[in-house]
Image (cartoon, rainbow, N blue to C red):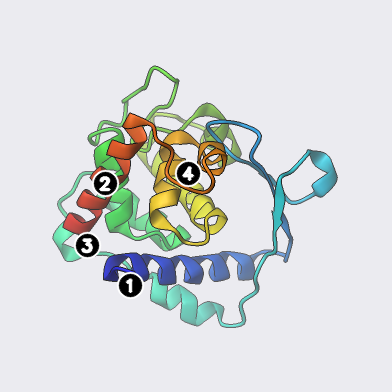
């Protein structure tokens, strides 16, 4: 595993531990029936679900939060929306470099970018993802970035920290990754998307 992939995986595990420790322990039920997005809930009888993720617990909140607060790079401070990215990184545990990389590929730092499929904003959120993460203003960079980072955190957890699969799922939908046996879907857009994000991620790390 490459160094920057390992760093991301470790920080993601820390973030999951922090978030779980701040809320009541609850299992998460995942529905992969939709092509573009995942549906997640904490009560199994509310909807059909594909499988369950057991929520971990943490006993050292202060230490984990202290670790997350150090996330960030001085080299990226001049990138657009860096303050918003740092806030999202500290909440979710996703590295700022990775968030910046996704923004660069998804929207080229245009907060009003919109795709033909209806995704919008810096992180190109689909409407259902925005609703799930309480995005009240689709043109608000802070809300858009935070929701996108939370969604990516879910995908990393869903795919056991595999960055390439998580990025493929961010682009093509987690159901597409599952459809092709847990591999990157052979879609031209997705096959181009994953290495592009990784290139920016390495550049910003």
Q: Nearer the viewer, mark 2 or mark 3?
A: 2
Q: Secondary structure at mark 1?
A: loop
Q: Nearer the viewer, mark 4 or mark 3?
A: 3
Q: Position of residue 122 (x, y in %)?
A: 33, 36
Q: Residue at x 45, y 34 (%)?
A: 172
- Density class for disc 1 (Cα within 10 Å; few <14, some 14-19, many ≥20) is few
Location of the C terminus by quadrant is bottom left
Q: Is residue 50 left or right of residue 198?
A: right
Confirm whether residue 117 shows in the render.
yes
Quarter holding residue 108: top left
Location of the N terminus by quadrant is bottom left
Label located before the other in sequence (1 or 2): 1
> Label 1: which residue?
70
Quarter holding residue 125: top left
| Residue 147: mark in rendering | 4
Badge 1 vs badge 2, beta-carbon distance below 8 Å: no
Q: Position of residue 190 (x, y in %)?
A: 36, 36
Q: Residue at x 55, y 35 (%)?
A: 37
Label located before the other in sequence (4 or 3): 4
Separation of residues labelled 4 and 2 (CA atoms): 23 Å
Question: Which of these two is toward me, 132 or 51?
Answer: 51
Q: Is residue 21 left or right of residue 184?
A: right
Separation of residues labelled 1 and 2 (CA atoms): 27 Å
Separation of residues labelled 2 and 3 (CA atoms): 15 Å
Label located before the other in sequence (1 or 3): 1
- Density class for disc 2 (Cα within 10 Å; few <14, some 14-19, many ≥20) is some
> Label 2: which residue?
195
> Label 3: which residue?
205
Label located before the other in sequence (4 or 2): 4
């Amino acid at each position: 595993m490459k160094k920057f992939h390992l760093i991301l995986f470790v920080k993601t595990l820390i973030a999951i531990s922090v978030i779980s420790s701040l809320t009541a322990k609850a299992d998460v039920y995942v529905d992969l029936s939709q092509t573009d997005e995942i549906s997640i809930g904490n009560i199994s009888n509310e909807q059909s679900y594909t499988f369950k993720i057991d929520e971990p617990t943490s006993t050292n909140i202060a230490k984990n939060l202290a670790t997350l607060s150090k996330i960030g790079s001085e080299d990226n401070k001049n990138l657009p929306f860096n303050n918003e990215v740092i806030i999202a990184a500290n909440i979710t545990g996703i590295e700022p470099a990775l968030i910046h990389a996704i923004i660069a590929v998804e929207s080229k730092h245009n907060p009003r970018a919109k795709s033909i499929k209806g995704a919008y904003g810096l992180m190109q959120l689909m409407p259902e993802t925005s609703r799930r993460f309480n995005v009240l203003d689709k043109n608000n960079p802070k809300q858009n970035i935070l929701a996108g980072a939370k969604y990516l955190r879910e995908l990393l957890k869903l795919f056991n920290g595999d960055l390439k699969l998580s990025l493929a799922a961010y682009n093509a939908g987690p159901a597409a990754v599952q459809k092709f046996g847990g591999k990157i879907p052979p879609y031209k857009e997705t096959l181009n998307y994953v290495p592009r994000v990784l290139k920016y991620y390495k550049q910003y790390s």
